[in-house]
Amino acid sequence: MKIMRTYFSAVGIDAEVFDECIWRSLETSEGTILGDFELVCRRVEFGNRVTYEVFALPKGATPARSAKNHSLTSPNKQTNN
């Protein structure tokens, strides 16, 4: 987490805003608007492990791996239409 915090601070995101985004990710993955972009933090649990996804996006953009765009169907699975 310290590496991510340092990186985002270096590119102009206040460390306190980053920390707040991480804390908010415990309840929601809504972004925080910062000028012309949005900081989005997501907390993801994998069994007994936790990871965080952090995106700095242009206002109104959606992360490429959003739940809406993620399919649980294998790309190799064939369907009969």
Image (cartoon, rainbow, N blue to C red):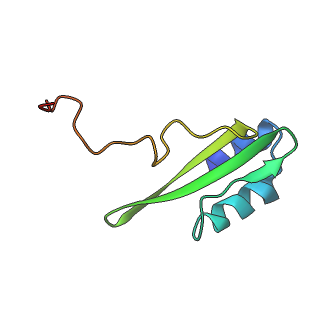
Q: State left or right for residue 68 relative to residue 2.
A: left
The image quadrant that residue 78 belongs to is top left
- Along the viewing direction, whichever of 54 and 69 lies nearer the viewer: 69
For the point 69% across and 53% down, which residue is it? 31
Return the x and y of residue 66 as percentages of the image width and height.
Answer: 50, 45
In the displayed image of the protein, which residue is found farthest to the bottom?
A: 27
Return the x and y of residue 68 as percentages of the image width and height.
Answer: 46, 46
For the point 84% across and 47% down, which residue is it? 34
For the point 64% across and 46% down, which residue is it? 4
- Along the viewing direction, whichever of 26 and 49 lies nearer the viewer: 26
Return the x and y of residue 16 as percentages of the image width and height.
Answer: 80, 59
- Along the viewing direction, whichever of 24 and 11 lies nearer the viewer: 24
In the displayed image of the protein, which residue is found farthest to the right?
A: 35
Q: Is residue 19 visible?
A: yes
Return the x and y of residue 60 as percentages of the image width and height.
Answer: 72, 41
Q: Is residue 1 visible?
A: no
